[in-house]
Amino acid sequence: MQMLGLSFETLATTFLIVIFLLVLLSSAIKVVKEYERAVVFRLGRLIGAKGPGLFFRIPIVDAFKIVDLRVVSFDVPKQRIITKDNVTVDVDAVVYYRVFDPIKAVIAVENYTYATNLLSQTTLRDVIGQVELDDLLSKREELGKRLTEIIDTATDPWGIKVVQVSIKDVSLPEEMQRAIAKQAEAERERRSRIIMAEGEYQAAAKMAEAAKLYQANPMAMRLRELQTFTEIAREKNMIVVTSAGVGQDLATMLGILKGAEKGSKR
């Protein structure tokens, strides 16, 4: 019985040791994905970035933090900003960034996501406050590139690469929307008047050229006059008063026209 008891205690002890070793081994073996890196600290000192794939750590002694290297996007909360020409607008933006140095992202800043978000809000307010409303509405791409350069320069020491900043929406007060609509209507009216004036100018120029041609060739002027009378004669309710010299020619033209009309009716 004692031998059996000793054997049972030995087996139990061995079983516990095996379980402890398995737990220790499982905590020592870690796996990080292709788009992740593990920043390892040993007794508080930086060892380096591990991964992707399998890596080993000393339990209790080593601590690590996983950093995602994929592009991350976040919405900048709506900011109420006063532009350079004293117009209050609400601006939304989207920031795309990624971690290119996981060690800097962990050591240089406490929370790189939160810090990048706050920096984007501040930079958005500063940049939009230096431009006028017309530039804000018509040059969003240029402003986005400018924001990207400023934020990327500031986050570079943190190991953060800002890929793109896009201005998503610009909200205007109703009074300003009505004012812009009136301005657009006035601009269209101005363009229509300019087009009409240009048309009159071109017509006057052509008429001046025609007058010179008629002056050089009086017979052409006479033919044009008779053509005009013919067009007037189509309106039966009109009375045309001409000089004596023109009456005979006019009567001849009217007769020809009337005969043509009777022939077409037959």
Image (tube, rainbow, N blue to C red):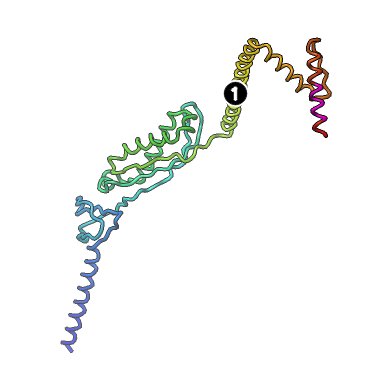
- The stretch drawn in magenta includes residue 260: yes
What's the residue type where badge 1 is placed? Ile
Residue at the image point whose x is 58% and y is 27% from the top: 183
Residue at the image point whose x is 58% and y is 26% from the top: 187
Question: Which residue is the site of mark 1?
Answer: 195
Quick one: which residue is furthest to the left in this view? 3
Packing grade of label 1 (10 A; few <14, some 14-19, many >=20) is few
Which contiguous range is marked in magenta? Answer: 254-262
> Where in the figure is residue 115, as x and y percent of width and height?
35, 43
Describe residue 235's horizontal placement relative to residue 207 as left or right: right
Which part of the image, by quadrant, shows the N terminus?
bottom left
Q: Quadrant of residue 246?
A: top right
Which part of the image, by quadrant, shows the C terminus?
top right
Residue at the image point whose x is 48% and y is 36% from the top: 80
Q: Nearer the viewer, residue 209 or 66?
A: 209
Describe residue 170's horizontal placement relative to residue 101 as left or right: right
Q: Nearer the viewer, residue 67 or 33?
A: 33
Please say if 144 is above or below 110. above
Q: State the SS at label 1.
A: helix
> Where in the figure is residue 258, as x and y percent of width and height?
82, 25
